[in-house]
Amino acid sequence: MSEANKKFLTPEHFYKFFQCPHWIWYDIYADAKKKKHIPPILELLYKGKLANTSESIRKFKEFEQIKPESFRDLEEAFLATLELMKQGKNIYHGVLMHENWVGMPDLLEAQAGKSDLGDWHYVVYDVQSSLDIGDQYKFQLVFYSLILERLQGVRPKEAFVIDPDGNTRSFLVDDFVSQFHVTREQIEKILEGEKPAPFLKSGCKKTPWYSLCVEGARECNDVSLIFRISQSDQRRLYDIGIRTVGQVADADVNELQAKLEDWPFDKLVRFNNQAKSLISQEPLILKKGNFPKVRYEIYFDIESDPTRDIHYLLGVLIKDTKSGSVEYRHFFANNKDEESEIWRSFLDFLADLNDFVIYHYAFLEKVVFDQFALKYGAPSALVSKFRENTIDLYNQTVESVILPLYFYSLKDVAGYVGYKWNDPEAGGAESVVWYNEWLENKSDVILKKILKYNEDDVRATMAVKEWLEQQKPHKGREKLE
């Protein structure tokens, strides 16, 4: 590839690669008309970024900003950054460049220690909605750190993440450099035109090309259509000559075990059953759902906006199993300051409950409950009451049934059992978009959309529970032990 045609390598490429390797390829080579628009707030949400990163950094460190007019040209912004680096200043949203590598970290911090710049060297920070540092974030930070090494003659020992409260977490850059270069080489091959092997993963849903990802995997009936198959699993199956869902469905599990000795047997049975379900388009019931008999069934769902570091809506559906009545209630925060108020209201609601069980779908509700209890406080008796009376219906679903689905999200599973959302295009991400619109204009119409979506979520959770309750294994069907 000539210097003139050389494509820039950016941190964005690493983020996209970890979500879906095809994203990079489709951006360059696919028909732009097939690209779905993703609102900017959703891009922040998916990337784990905050709407206002500078506030988090200010809690932690004073910094200089590059003049906005410098960003008319990236090289000009880089030269402005380099000038501040030569002065030993902390820099917010500086531009780092070396040959075809370009990045814009949230914060460059000058630390004591000799470099080509003087008696200081730079380390890099990124602001994220949490301190969980997945590989997609680590590799971006390694990328910045390696550019810094080229500029200052010293590789930073650590790279850092900051959360909304200004807390930090670091990792050792050298621990990930080798993996980084393997990924970098894969990305560069894609940039040069090599299309990745078909693969469907949950991250594909966050891309503007999801429909093409599904289409590509379906065309060759790729094994990645099987729920929970990872890219490393796909490669292992390819290595033993198994590339399609049909081949997994037809395989003898014992023969697979002989070829994949390090794989747990129940994993192989699960993949085999999942493949059979996709082929037959019929569910496989592994065991009957076992749910407690109580007076009140509570279905619980939380809406959150990590870009603003707020959990803005706690919704509950209360089913009285004696009378059959069903009532939706919600606790809504108009802003961050009201988060503690909706928490106290929820605790009051919890305190009044007797002879009940709380159902939720996946882990968010338990995580947020624990976060709120730690941040705003809660009586230990109520914390125990919540923890001892909650059931995760996602776990129940995965343990008790095999469904002819690619994913087991609430939207996927509840849709399969027949539940229909008021807005078919709505999802948790769309709720975040609406919440941000509502913050701007305080429209009652938008607020009703937010509440209706949350009510749909808790009603969908109830639909999943009631469907599971009705299922029982069929004699003669293969069963996961």
Image (cartoon, rainbow, N blue to C red):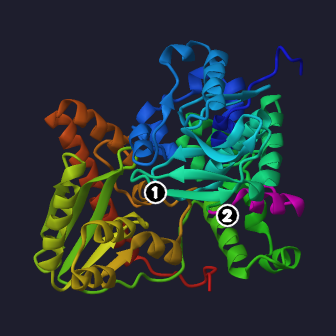
The crowding category of the residue bearing disc 1, from other C-alpha atoms within 10 Å (few below 14, some 14 to 19, many at least 20), is some
Query: Can you say whether 409 is above or below 189 in the image?
Result: below
Could you tell me which quadrant the C terminus lies in?
A: bottom right
The crowding category of the residue bearing disc 2, from other C-alpha atoms within 10 Å (few below 14, some 14 to 19, many at least 20), is many
Residue closer to the observer: 96 or 349: 96
The residue at the far front in this view is 119
Horizontal side of residue 384 vs 160, given as left or right: left
Determine if the magenta segment contains residue 440. no
Tell me if I can see residue 177 in this picture.
yes
Determine if the magenta segment contains residue 241. yes
Residue closer to the observer: 260 or 10: 10
Residue 316, image x, y percentages:
22, 64
* Mark 2, residue position: 275
Q: Residue at x 56, y 12 (%)?
A: 72
The kind of secondary structure element at disc 1 is loop
The kind of secondary structure element at disc 2 is helix
Q: Amino acid at mark 1?
A: Asn
* Mark 1, residue position: 167
Q: Residue at x 54, y 79 (%)?
A: 286
Horizontal side of residue 303 vs 83, given as left or right: left
Q: Residue at x 66, y 20 (%)?
A: 79
Residue range corresponding to the magenta coloring = 228-243
